[in-house]
Image (cartoon, rainbow, N blue to C red):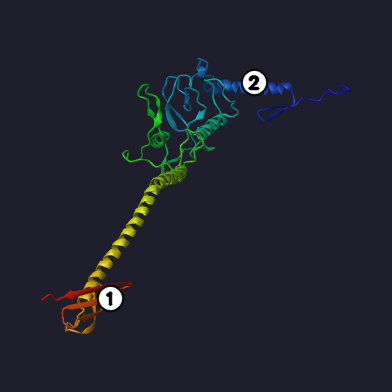
Amino acid sequence: MAADGSVTAPSYVIQGASFGDVGSALGSLDAAVTTLNTAGSRYVAVRSTGAAAQATATDSLAGLSGAAEAFSGITVASTAGAVSVGAEGAERQIVNVAGGTQDTDAVNLRQLRAVGGNLAGALGGGAGFAADGRFTGPTYALGGRSYSGVGDALAAVDAFVVKYDVDPATGGRGQSMTLAGSDPNQPVLIRNVAAGVQPTDAANLGQVTAQVATAKAQSFAYTDQRVQASYAAGTAYTDARVAPLEKQANAFGSQLAGLQNEVGQVRQEARRGAAIGLAAASLRFDDRPGKLSMAAGGGVWRGEGAASMGIGYTLPDGSARVNATGVAAGRDFGIGAGASFTLN
C-alpha cells in the first residue's frame, strides 16, 4: 500500500508457478495437498496405520512385514517402518538433509565423507575416501614388505618391535631387554648409537675405543714412572751395596796384579837363572900346567837367555887351577870365581 492509498497486488510463487492473488495461491496449495494425500501418502505417511499409509501399489518398495526390499538395485531384508523413496530403476535423491545429531537420525553425505576422511586419515598408509564413496585401503611397508590390512601390519610390527623382558614376578614389563634377530642364538648388532652423556647411557664403540686408548696410555705412563722410580731406587741401593765390594775388588785386583807381576818376575828370574847356569856350564878352560885361557859361553831356557865369559889359569906344576867367570842375563849381571887343587 502506497502513501496515496493505492494497493500493489501480491505475487505468490508455489511449485514454480506465480499467483497474483491469495485465492489462486490457496487453490494451488489445496490441489497439491490433495495430490499428496492421494498419490504420495503411501510413501511418506509411514507413521499412519490408515489405508493411505500402506505401500501396496505396483511401484511400492517398502514392505512393512519384513519382506525383501530393493534399494539402488541391491536386495536387502526390510524391517518394519522402512521408507521407500522412488521406485526400482527410478531412484531419487533426498536433498537438503541436515546433519544427524541423535543415534536414530539420518546422516547426510557430508557427514559420511567426514567419517570416511577421518577414517582414512586415522588409518594412514595412503588410505583415501573418494567423493563417489569409493574407499582406497591403506598399504603399510614394514621390514621391506607391504601389508594392506591393519591386523597384518600390527602382526609385522610385533615381530620387528624391540620388547622388554617379562617380569616373572608380575608378568608385566621387566627392567631388561633381550635383542633377538633371525637367529636367536646369535648376538644382535646395534648401529648408529649416539655417544652416551649420562652415567646410565649406552656407550658406542668410538667411546669405548677412546677410553681404552686413554686407559692404556695412562697405564703405560704409570708403569714407566714406577719402573723408572724402582730402577733408580734399585740402582742406588745396588750401587751403595756394590761400591764397597768394587773397592775391595779393585784393591784385591791391584794386589793380584802386583802378585802376578812379582810371580812373573820370579818366573823370569828363575828362567834366567837356568839360562845362566847353562851359560856358565858351557865354559871350558885349558887344564895344561902354566896355561892361562879364556872361555865364553851362552845358554837359553824357556825364552830367557844368558851369556858367560871367564878366565882360567893352571899352575906350572899342575897342582892348582883358578878361574873367574862373569855372566849376563837381560839387565842382570853376575860374577863367580873358583879354584881347584890336585892333592896327589
In front: 10, or 131?
Answer: 131
Residue 96 versus residue 325 in the image, above or below: above
Q: Which residue is mark 2?
A: 30
Q: Which residue is mark 1?
A: 326
Is residue 343 visible in the rendered structure shown here? yes
Query: The C terminus is located in which quarter?
Result: bottom left
Query: In the drawing, does residue 298 fall left or right of residue 168?
Result: left
Residue drawn at (37%, 23%), measured in percent from left and top?
Answer: 171
Q: Residues within 10 Å of mark 1 (few under 14, many from 20)?
A: some
Q: Farthest residue to the right: give it.
A: 4
Residue type pointed to by label 1: Gly
Residue drawn at (54%, 26%), measured in percent from left and top?
Answer: 107
Q: Position of residue 253 (x, y in %)?
A: 34, 56
Q: Secondary structure at mark 1?
A: strand
Image quadrant where residue 319 sits: bottom left
Which mark is nearer the camera, 2 or 1?
1
Residue type pointed to by label 2: Asp
Residue drawn at (58%, 25%), measured in percent from left and top?
Answer: 99
Is residue 93 visible in the rendered structure shown here? no
Q: Position of residue 24 (x, y in %)?
A: 71, 23
Of the residues under marks 2 and 1, which one precedes in the sequence?
Answer: 2
Residue 22 versus residue 161 in the image, above or below: above
Residue drawn at (56%, 23%), measured in percent from left and top?
Answer: 100
